[in-house]
Amino acid sequence: MASDEAPKPAADRIRVVGKWVGALEVDLGAWTVPMLRAEVARRVGDGVEPERVGLIFGGRVLKDDPPASLREAGLKANAKVLSSLTSPDRAKEIAAEAAKAKAEEEHAARLVRLWDAAKAMSQRHTDGSFLEDEDYNLDLEDQSGQKVMFGSVDDMKALKMALMLHQKAKTQMKKKMYKEALDVLIMAEEAFSLCDSKLIEKVDNVPMLQLDIVWCYFVLRDISCLEVAGTRLEKARVGFERSHGKDSSRFRVLQSGRQADLAIYVRLELLEGVVAYHNGQTEKARGSLTSAQAKYLQLQVPDEAISMLMDMGYEARSAKRALKMTGYDIQSSVDLLCDEREKKIRRQEEDRERQREILEQMRYGKTPMNKAVDLQKLRGLTNIGFEKYLAAEALRINENDAEKALDLLTNPEENCILQNKIQARRRRATRGSSSSRAARTASATNNSQAFVSAPPHAVDGNAPPHAADGNPPEGNNADGNLPEGNDVDGNPPEGNSAQLLDSVEAMINEETANQDVVMTDEVAVNDEDTNSHPVPARDVSMESDLAHELTGDALDDYDIEVSDEGQAIAEYLSLLESAASS
């Protein structure tokens, strides 16, 4: 009687010699090196761990990584494999070395990703590259919160890249990941080196970086870096004096007399004292450590002062920071906290405005070089009387060249052709998305949580592209009135800023969904060069890590908890005393 079961494949036989001798029947296509290792360990007996078994075939060691079948490893039927047995300690050492090598490889790969992500972000956020799913923007600010333009475009890119990497390293330092942070700091130093040296001499970011690198040396107890640590500390002190002024005079003026940088000099003088101590310069070490200790004591905030500010409604951490930076002066601390609150509110308003601009740019599509439409140039064209949607399209197809866009708009024939293209695109979009628009409208009508809508026109009064085709703009009622919840000026009601921002984003996304599709279609049809400049692959997770760690807090670099520094100062002063008494 025929059997329904498929015949099992014939097993291959291999010979094992060495620590265990015998023949094994294996499936060369299914068995892997770890399986063979485990089987030999079982045959050896005495509870031998598979990790202790070494296998050699054809003069080479069979490795587990990458996992492969025995056939892929080169074994054939009747192959002879030499087995060996390492000592338990040696097996653990081998396993530890393999794990360390793997961890180092992963760390190196992560550093490459981090560098590439920072480089890509600095590129996009300097040259205006377009990315649909990115709703944030990177700007450079001074300590007063004002936007700054720093040197050339290349300098801007390098500086943004360096600051992102430095911030990432500082986050790792706060998590006590000093070894990982040190590698990122070195990358940030490389990025800073790409900037014009005369420009970065004006800021204290580079001296701060040098100080952070030496602090990592100290925490990791890396004595081998002692000599280079001294050089880095000299650079840091010269850099601080250049940017802060002699005895921090310039810094005090900028900070309204506050001593926000005091913790920085505690760390600097401590490290200078440590380097001097290990170099046998006892008196220099004593002077640096004594000065650091005096500054450290100034940063010990009385609990009563913190309680007073907390009674006024401030958080303990913010209160302590303000008191440290003002020398425990209550009124100055309150002034500082109020200033910081105003800056935070202003930054939130600017962020909301910038997010609206990003969403507006998405409406106009991307240029052939994957750039967003330059809103500043767009405002210039609309200010002289051109319709916004027409001016935006002229800028888009001319790669944001305002002069070429102006020439197109002032040429009656080309202007007419451009308008006809836009009208044709609208008709295609209207035919292709009527059903989805109706579905969205019904959904919006039935959504009881939608409490705010924006006016159906832009702030400057120009009608959006869909207004000229005779269709009522989305967001209005059927009778043309503004939606409920807006005031007579079309402004949304006051409320929670986060909720307001979410609602505005949802509204703009809803209002411009069709326009995005239409603009993309126009690019595909009329701009053949677009496909020759594809958007590079994006490391979303790494970029998100970098972006979300940028706090915009101008005083964050100076807000150092100096408890570790205090212990180190006491330790090295004690060593000096012991050396003097012996």
Image: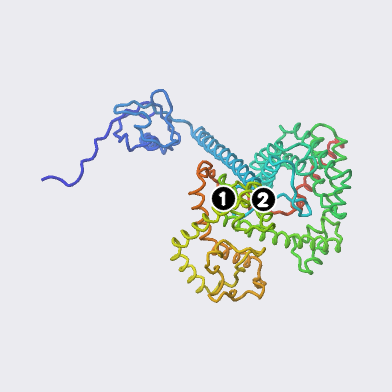
> Which residue was labeled with disc 1?
366
- Identify which residue, 560 or 256, lies in the foreground: 256
Q: Residues within 10 Å of mark 2 (few under 14, many from 20)?
A: some
In this view, 472 is above or below 109: below
- The residue that appears at 67% across and 58% down in the rendered structure is 385
**Residue at the top extreme, as displayed:** 59
- Identify which residue, 50 or 428, lies in the foreground: 428
The answer to which image quadrant residue 488 occupies is bottom right
- The residue that appears at 62% across and 58% down in the rendered structure is 388
Q: Quadrant of the N terminus?
A: top left
First in sequence: mark 2 vs mark 1: 2
Count of labels shown? 2
Residue 96: give x, y in percent of width and height: 53, 37
Left or right, residue 468 beside residue 570: left
Kind of residue at disc 1: Lys
The answer to which image quadrant residue 311 occupies is bottom right
Residue 12: give x, y in percent of width and height: 28, 32
- The residue that appears at 72% across and 34% down in the rendered structure is 223
Q: Report the disc number at residue 143.
A: none
Residue 165: give x, y in percent of width and height: 66, 44
Helix, strand or loop under label 1: loop
Helix, strand or loop under label 2: loop
- Identify which residue, 387 or 259, lies in the foreground: 387
Residue 471: give x, y in percent of width and height: 52, 68
In this view, 268 is above or below 501: above
The answer to which image quadrant residue 155 occupies is top right
> Which residue was labeled with disc 2?
138
Kind of residue at disc 2: Leu
